Image: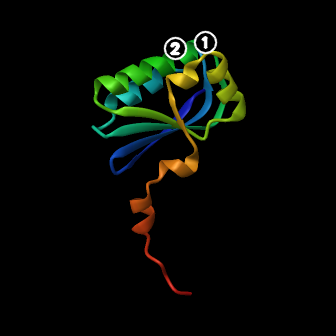
Amino acid sequence: MLNIERRNLGPVSLLNLEGNVVIGETGALHDIVQSLPPTSSVVLDLSRVRLVDAHGLGVLLQVREQSRARGMELQFTNVSNQLREVFRITRLDAVFQIRSGVEFFSLPARQRRTLVAA
């Protein structure tokens, strides 16, 4: 089962995926992306994705097109080495924007933190 948690972080919609992106489990992903409020980008956190099959790769490509049609950039973050290898073998690493979790947060967001003396 694919579980999806949605969070809006200013100009970014973050979708935390957990489970398998496989045939029969991906309908909710389409629906959520279609219902997102307008943002500059959609980030899929794949840290808890265990398996992506050929159908799942196709769905990720469709989600990319859905996002682009709405003027939003699609990015992946926290991609496991195993999934990176799948993207490399299928040459989808040249299609998808894959970022590390640290790169996701911009410097201005970090600068807005308030320091509290202990």
The CA distance from mark 1 to mark 2 is: 6 Å
Q: Would you name the residue on which mark 1 appears?
A: 54
Residue 61 percent across, percent down from the top left: 47, 18
Element at label 2: helix
Q: How busy is the neighbourhood of tag 2: few (under 14 within 10 Å), some, or many (20 plus)?
A: some
Residue at 46% from the left image edge and 25% from the top image edge? 28
Element at label 1: helix
Residue 115 percent across, percent down from the top left: 47, 78
Residue at 69% from the left image edge and 25% from the top image edge? 85
Residue 53 as seen in the image, left or right of residue 13? right
Residue 38 percent across, percent down from the top left: 27, 37
Residue projecting furthest to the right: 82
Q: Quadrant of residue 49?
A: top right
Tag 2: amino acid? Gly
For the question of whether residue 91 can be seen, the reply is: yes
**Labelled pair 1, 2 in contact (Cβ < 8 Å):** yes
Q: Quadrant of residue 2?
A: top right
Above or below 19: residue 101? below
Residue at 72% from the left image edge and 29% from the top image edge? 82
Q: Would you name the residue on which mark 2 appears?
A: 58
Q: Quadrant of residue 69?
A: top left
For the question of whether residue 24 can be seen, the reply is: no
